[in-house]
Image (spheres, coloured by chain):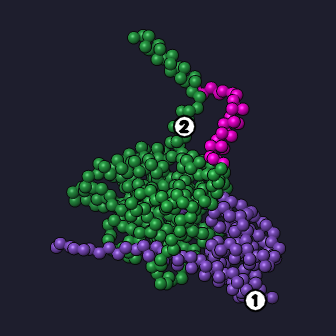
Chain colours: A purple, B green
């Protein structure tokens, strides 16, 4: 029996759920296919909608920006519940993320999955953001005042 | 008075087939895919998502395909689909200050931190037709990188629930007085042409006191939701937004000040964000809120105008008789 302290913390779970929601799909597929876990679907995958809330700058008015589709899935593997809510109508991603959420809670599987899936996925997400930020910054104009009269 | 009419089933069935043929166009030309629309008709997709009030690029692209590129009809389709989706709560308030910019400009501050990021804008093009796009494969221009490195930016949930609950405009009927939360909610989904026209009428009569774009930003922002079942607030993905902050000088003796306006749209849609900000500011300076908010919704306005095409035989007969009677009395 693994001591309680080896069970991943809630903070870790929050972070990996954020990674699973954005990870390249083939990476998620490969991680599940290699393991063939016996998952029982408890909820979904089902598509629904959430209200997007925001706060207007300056006035601080909270308002309803519109809605977005989300896909929700809950599975059970070896008594552990895997949970996923991902943005968009994407049943495959939601189910893969729910399965992997359950597997990542298993202390015997966590370290291997973290190395094989979470690290490369996080690297891919960071790299995509870096490329996007770099491309945007390449279009930055630094205007200067040519002449100023006192 | 509405009098139902019956019949015409065969004609309606044939009319639907005619619509499907019109949608397809020349069968010798390859059919558009939804993915092509999603990736290459971004302006239309973003507008349909904004006015349809549902962020889903694939569904908006599908709606555009079905509507033969008619933005108003596609918006109607997306709204109708939205009504059939199950409600699954709400996001944590989006952190609009944390938009990762693809574009960031200001007309009031010359020296923006990070520079004026021009991004993918048509502002500096000559608006000449580019006949090289007539050909098949235009070369894909690689991006230069303006950054050596970027600090690791991990997806992480953020944002606390505010004290004030925004009004859910999808469940509360639109009635005066219009609170600030409802005003913004209705303006976001407001029809772009209507808001642009309103902004234009205000600007043409504004004189020296016209508004300024203080901050215009387009990029990605993170969406987080609180999952009560597991007691965690998690990040579920990113959406693209365009947000515009505006200021207008209000010249009123010792009470002169700058009045703010705010506009936002899904995806990359500056005209909408700027027009909305100008209208939001004008509403604070006396523009009739009934005129704006009761008429800004494109689906409602389009629906009402289109209903004139439905049979009005009895109404029209009654009107004709009234006209004849009055004209005979004279």
Image position, residue B276 (x, y; %): 42, 55
Residue topped by disc 1: A3
Determine whether the residue tagged by mark 2 lies in a helix, strand or loop.
helix
Q: Is residue B260 visible?
A: yes
Residue B17 belongs to magenta span? yes
Q: Please report, as a chain letter, where disc 2 is located.
A: B
Residue topped by disc 2: B306
Q: Is residue B305 above or below residue B285?
A: above
| Front: mark 1 or 2 | 2
Residue B174 belongs to magenta span? no
Say left or right for B238 vs B12: left
User: Label 1: how many residues lie within 10 Å, few (<14), some (14-19) or many (20+)?
Assistant: few
Q: Are marks 1 and 2 in contact (CB under 8 Å)?
A: no
Determine whether the residue tagged by mark 1 lies in a helix, strand or loop.
loop
Say left or right for B120 vs B286: right
Quarter holding residue A72: bottom right
Q: Please report, as a chain letter, where disc 1 is located.
A: A
Image position, residue A29 (x, y; %): 73, 74
Image position, residue B127 (x, y; %): 41, 58
User: Label 2: how many residues lie within 10 Å, few (<14), some (14-19) or many (20+)?
Assistant: few
Residue sitting at x 53%, y 65%:
B138
Residue sitting at x 63%, y 47%:
B26
Residue sitting at x 52%, y 77%:
A131
Spatial separation of the CA atoms under disc 1 and disc 2: 68 Å
Image position, residue B12 (x, y; %): 68, 34
Magenta segment: B1-27
User: In the rendered image, which quarter contains the N terminus of chain A?
Assistant: bottom right
């Amino acid at each position: 029996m693994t001591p309680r302290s080896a069970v991943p913390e809630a903070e870790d779970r929050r972070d990996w759920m954020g990674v699973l929601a954005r990870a390249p799909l083939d990476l998620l597929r490969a991680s599940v296919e290699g393991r063939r876990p016996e998952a029982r679907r408890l909820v979904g995958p089902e598509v629904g909608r959430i209200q997007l809330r925001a706060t207007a700058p300056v006035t601080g008015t909270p308002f309803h920006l519109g809605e977005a589709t989300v896909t929700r899935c809950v599975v059970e593997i070896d008594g552990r519940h895997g949970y996923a809510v991902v943005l968009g109508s994407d049943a495959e991603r939601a189910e893969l993320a729910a399965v992997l959420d359950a597997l990542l809670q298993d202390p015997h599987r966590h370290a291997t999955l973290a190395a094989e899936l979470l690290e490369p996925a996080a690297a891919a997400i960071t790299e995509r953001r870096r490329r996007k930020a770099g491309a945007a910054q390449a279009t930055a104009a630094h205007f200067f005042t040519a002449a100023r009269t006192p | 008075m509405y009098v139902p009419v019956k019949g015409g089933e065969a004609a309606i069935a044939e009319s639907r087939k005619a619509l499907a043929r019109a949608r397809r166009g020349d069968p010798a030309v390859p059919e558009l895919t939804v993915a092509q629309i999603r990736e290459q008709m971004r302006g239309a997709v973003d507008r349909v998502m904004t006015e349809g009030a549902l962020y889903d690029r694939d569904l908006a692209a599908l709606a555009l395909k079905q509507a033969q590129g008619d933005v108003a009809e596609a918006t109607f389709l997306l709204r109708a689909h939205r009504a059939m989706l199950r409600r699954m709560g709400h996001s944590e308030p989006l952190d609009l200050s944390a938009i990762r910019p693809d574009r960031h400009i200001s007309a009031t501050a010359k020296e923006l931190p990070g520079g004026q990021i021009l991004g993918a804008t048509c502002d500096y093009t000559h608006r000449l037709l580019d006949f090289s796009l007539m050909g098949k494969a235009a070369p894909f221009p690689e991006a230069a990188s303006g950054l050596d490195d970027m600090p690791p930016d991990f997806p992480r949930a953020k944002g606390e629930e505010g004290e004030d609950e925004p009004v859910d405009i999808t469940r509360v009927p639109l009635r005066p007085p219009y609170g600030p939360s409802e005003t913004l909610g209705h303006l976001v989904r407001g029809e772009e042409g209507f808001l642009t026209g309103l902004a234009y009428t205000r600007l043409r009569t504004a004189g020296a006191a016209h508004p300024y774009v203080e901050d215009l930003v387009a990029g990605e922002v993170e969406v987080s939701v609180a999952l009560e079942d597991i007691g965690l607030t998690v990040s579920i993905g990113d959406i693209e937004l365009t947000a515009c902050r505006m200021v207008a000088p209000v010249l009123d003796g010792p009470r002169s000040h700058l009045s703010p306006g705010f506009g936002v749209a899904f995806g990359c849609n500056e005209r909408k964000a700027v027009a909305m900000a100008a209208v939001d500011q004008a509403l604070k300076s006396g523009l009739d809120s009934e005129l704006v908010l009761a008429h800004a919704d494109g689906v409602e306005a389009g629906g009402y105008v289109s209903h004139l095409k439905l049979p009005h035989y009895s109404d029209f007969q009654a009107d004709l008789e009234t006209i004849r009677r009055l004209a005979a009395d004279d």
